[in-house]
Amino acid sequence: MRLEVANEYIEAKAGQIAYVDLGSSASGSTYEVQARADNAVYNDISVFICSERDLQMLLAGRSNQCRGTNKEKGLVQFSVKTQHDGRHYLVINNSYSMMVEKKVNANVTLVAHMPEEIRSKFEQNLLQANAGIQRTFVVDDFDFRIEPCGMKNAFSKSATGDITMCSELMFDLLKKKMPGAIEGVMYHELGHTLLNLWGLPGWDNEETADEFALVMLYWAGAQEKAIDWIRYYAEHDSKAEAVHALKNGDRHPLSIQRIRNAQRILENPREVITRWNKLLYPHMTKEGLQGLLNTSPVYVDGALMDRYLKSAPAAKNQAVLASPPSQRSPQQSLWGPVN
């Protein structure tokens, strides 16, 4: 897994050492560091990764095994593999300066094996998600993955429909206490995948996938989780996105547009859900349609539902599916708990 453990602006006063707690990591993990001094003049910096013991030795002026780079100018980049379990720190050593304060922007990413407890929980959630999708929709099998990507992102592979949630994004959203945003992102990618595998138009349209995600949250009786999703987009710089889109032709709408679209749907969900009912009911299993009657009856199109219930196929792989929709809590989405 790769996760950002620090993205900090640090001021190290003249003659002093500043440091940031990066949390605990296991022996053999790797910290990837990028740092740059904002000083117009004297922009050299000394940046290190220290274990707790080595930090105390450094602060005491004693020999230590902190590792990094010393008095380097410009963008500083290096990696350090940990030698021991325990807490580690990003250190800006400005003790050699007599007058100049160093103003440093630093980013640190931890690359490590996912702890077994967390890996098992994620695996359980993804298996539950897959069972829920196969129980609800008539669709060919595809894979779910959580893996490091080198960026905070998620994507659906057009050739196979496989969905990847980058560990960088997953852990960032968990760290920020936005579990609802994880479901929003995953439903968004599921929208790309299902429409693609069904051969329907709009499968590669980002706003269409956003609509699908919000409809799924309503179907699951978990529409309040859209608030986290909106908070996630609110963190983005739409002006920077606009510049990037002009230069690179990015097809994604700006975050501010996605927020406004989501808010519009939340204010009047029935119109959007009614349109999606007509599109999705023909691709649903009998169990999926019956489950929808239990979880979100207020948004069910009764006449249309009756029409497709008569001809809908049963969900495949019955023996390995999770509990049927009638046994799910109204607040539990197809993905199950993720926080």
Image (tube, rainbow, N blue to C red):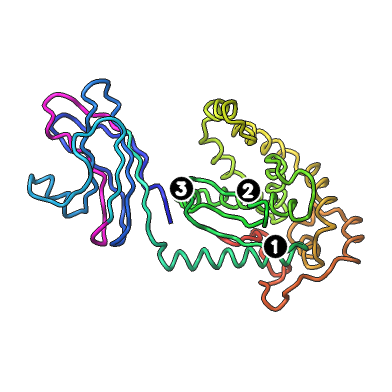
Within 10 Å of disc 2 (Cα), the crowding (few <14, some 14-19, many 20+) is few
The Cα atoms of the two marked residues, 3 and 1, are separated by 28 Å
Camera-side residue of 339 and 12: 12
Disc nearer the start of the sequence (2/3): 3
The Cα atoms of the two marked residues, 2 and 1, are separated by 21 Å
Residue at the (66%, 64%) spot, across then down: 329
The mark found on residue 150 in the picture is 3
Residue at the (66%, 49%) spot, across then down: 223
Residue that badge 2 annotates: 224
Residue 171 screen position, x and y as percent: 46, 52
Which structural element holds mark 1? helix
Amino acid residing under circle 1: Ile
Give the magenta part as a residue range: 82-104
Frontmost of labels 2 and 3 is 3
Residue at the (8%, 50%) spot, across then down: 63
Determine contact: label 3, label 1, CB under 8 Å.
no
Amino acid residing under circle 3: Gly
Disc nearer the start of the sequence (3/1): 1
Residue that badge 1 annotates: 133
Camera-side residue of 198 and 239: 198
The mark found on residue 167 in the picture is none
Residue 50 screen position, x and y as percent: 21, 50
Q: Is residue 32 above or below residue 332?
A: above
Tell me if 322 is positioned left or right of 97 in this view: right
Within 10 Å of disc 1 (Cα), the crowding (few <14, some 14-19, many 20+) is many
Residue at the (73%, 76%) spot, across then down: 318
Which structural element holds mark 3? loop
Q: Is residue 194 above or below residue 97?
A: below
Residue 276 screen position, x and y as percent: 80, 48
